[in-house]
Amino acid sequence: MKCREIVEILEQLSPGKYACEWDNVGLLVGRMDKEVHKIMIALDASKDVVTCAVEAGVDMLITHHPMIFTAIKQVNEEQFTGEKVLSLAENGICYYAMHTNFDSVGGMADLAAGEQYLNLSDVSPIHFSNEVCVVEGQGMGRYGRLPKPMTAEQVAEYVKERFDLSFVILYQNEKQKSKVYEKIAVMPGSGKSDMKKVKADGYELYLTGDYGHHEGIDAMDMGLTVIDATHYGLEHIFTGYLAGYLKDKLADCNVEIVEADMGCPAQVL
C-alpha cells in the first residue's frame, strides 16, 4: 500500500486544513509513493522512538506531536531534529504528524471526554482562541458533567485511574479544598492561555496539561481550580486510538500496525 493512500485515510479522520496556523502537520519526511507494509504509531518522534522505528524495520512513522515545529536551516547529525530526519530518510521511513487537526476534529477531545476515559455527560465543544477553523460540534476542548459530584482531589484520583497515570498536579486555593464540582472543562495538551474563557463560561474546574507555576497562581487567584495531568498524561491515548482506527481501515491490506509508548517523560521522585 502506498504512503499516499494511508495519508488519505488519515485525512478522512482529521483533515490537515483544521490544524492551527502555527502548527506543522502532514507528511514531514519521505515520499508519497513509498510502499508501506509496517506502520509505527507514537505520541512523539523522540530519538528513542526513531531508533525503535529503524530497528523494527517500519516503513512509516505516525506521531501526534510534530518532530519539526519551526524551520530548520541545517539537516545534519549535529542538530537534534536534523539527526532524526537523517535517520528516517536514510532508512526510507515516511514520517507523518497529525496534531491540532486531530485535537479538533475526529480525535483527542472527544476521546478524552468519552466513555473510555472521563465518561462525561452533557458534552459540548470549547472553541479556543488559537483555533483557525471552527467546525460545528468540534473544537480542541470539551465541557461536560462529571459522572458524579466530586472534590478536586477526588477528580484528580479519578483522572489518574482513568488515564493510567502515577501523578497529576493540582492548583487549588486552600479555601476551595472542600468544594464539590459537578462539571469540568477539559483541554488535552496545554490550555493555559484560555483559562479566562473557561472561567467566564462558568467552569471552575479545568483539566489540562503543561500548565506552569505562574499560570497556576493566576488560576488560583481567579478562583479556578486546575488539574495538570501533563502533556503526555492526557494525550498518550492517541497511540491506541489511532492504531485501532488504522487496523479497522486496513483490515484487508497487508499492513502491520505497531505502537510505541515510551511512557511519561516526567517523573515525581
Image (cartoon, grey):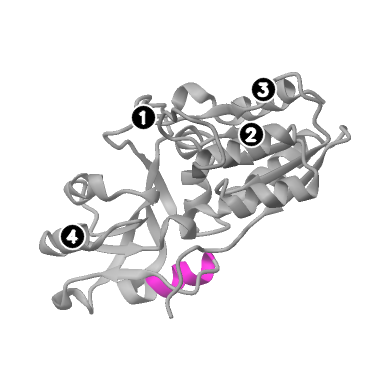
User: Residue 60 magenta-drawn?
Assistant: no
- Dots 4 and 1: beta carbons under 8 Å? no
Name the residue that disc number 4 marks: 214
Q: Nearer the viewer, mark 3 or mark 1?
A: 1
Mark with earlier residue (4, 1): 1
Residue bearing the label numbered 2:
95
Residue at the disc numbered 1:
22
Q: Which residue type does callout 2 highlight?
A: Tyr
Mark seen at residue 8: 3
Which residue shows up at 38% across the image and 24% down it? 133
Question: Which one is in front in this view, the residue at disc 3 or the one at disc 2?
Answer: 2
Q: Which residues, given as a range, are shown in magenta?
A: 156-163
In this rendered view, identify the residue nearer to me: 123 or 15: 15
Nearer-the-camera pick, 27 or 237: 27
- Is 32 placed above or below 148 here? above
Whether residue 158 appears in magenta in the rendering, the answer is yes
Which quarter shows the N terminus?
Answer: top right
Q: Residues within 10 Å of mark 2 (few under 14, many from 20)?
A: many
Estimate the x, y position of residue 63 in percent, counting from the top left: 59, 42
Image location (x, y in percent) of residue 170: 30, 70
Q: Between disc 4 and disc 2, whose residue precedes?
A: 2
Element type where label 1 sits in the image: loop
Q: Amino acid at mark 1?
A: Trp
Work out whether 184 lies above or below 12. below
Foreground disc of the pair 4, 2: 2
Residue plotted at (55% across, 68% down): 164
Q: Mark 3: which amino acid?
A: Glu
In the displayed structure image, the side of residue 199 where residue 8 appears, left or right: right
